[in-house]
Amino acid sequence: MYLLSSFLSAGGKLVKAHLPIDKGLPGALRSAAYLARSQEPYEELIFVNASGLGAKELVPDDAMFPVRGQTVLVKWEAKCAKTMNENRYVIPRPGSGTTVLGGTREVGNWRTAVSSETTNAILEGCKSLAPELLAKDGSFEVLSVQCGLRPARENGPRVEAEVVDGMFTVHSYGHAGAGYQNAIGSARKVVRLVKELDFKAEL
């Protein structure tokens, strides 16, 4: 929400719409261009393709694949973040009164339904990492369980510029589970790539 608020306060506009994918990325970009110009008479447009796992079909990019992850949100904040291994960790959310317990990393798994068996394994595995969060009966107070597909890509994220059917596009997707950590760096690279685009040379 902070980034969105900053974007809007800087004069940005948010338009929510469904874009067609049956004609691939060029078709989606043309629809986005029509929407943008219906708001303002822009001369030049630059698109940032941050379609995540959707890039597999949209671009299309066969290097994309899902990494299924499941976490549990519990009440109270742990004293500090702790990690036992890549699948057992405790991450407090400062100021929220909650802590995230994790997790799973299932490469190639497209299943988005929550697994109760996985939930129980996470809860049991994290007890030694954050005993201060346990109730008198030795259990966590579970607030919610999350399950999602992280957009991974063979050979790493794609952050590069391309002219797609005459439209200037900067791709930024495929960050897998490191999207939060890499967000600022990737955003800065996107801005640099946008500034480096030479419209006249491509026309």
Image (spheres, rainbow, N blue to C red):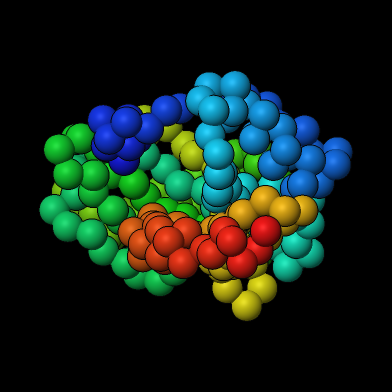
Q: Quadrant of the C terminus?
A: bottom right
Q: Could you tell me which residue is drawn at 78 percent across and 64 percent down?
A: 62
Q: Is residue 203 above or below residue 139?
A: below
What number of labels is visible? 0
Residue 190 position by quadrant: bottom left
Q: Is residue 44 above or below residue 190?
A: above
Q: Is residue 137 above or below residue 202?
A: above
Q: Using the image as rendered, state which of residue 171 and residue 154 is in the foreground.
A: 171
Q: Could you tell me which residue is drawn at 61 percent across and 55 percent down?
A: 169
- Is residue 89 rendered to the left or right of residue 169? left
Residue farthest right in this picture: 22
Residue 55 x/y as whole percent: 69, 53
Q: Could you tell me which residue is drawn at 52 percent across and 63 percent down?
A: 197
Residue 87 in sight from this viewpoint: no
Residue 128 x/y as whole percent: 28, 60
Residue 19 x/y as whole percent: 71, 32
Q: Quadrant of the N terminus?
A: top left
Residue farthest bottom in this picture: 155
Q: Could you tell me which residue is drawn at 59 percent across and 28 percent down?
A: 37
Q: Using the image as rendered, state which of residue 94 and residue 125 is in the foreground.
A: 94
Residue 74 x/y as whole percent: 32, 38
Residue 183 in sight from this viewpoint: yes
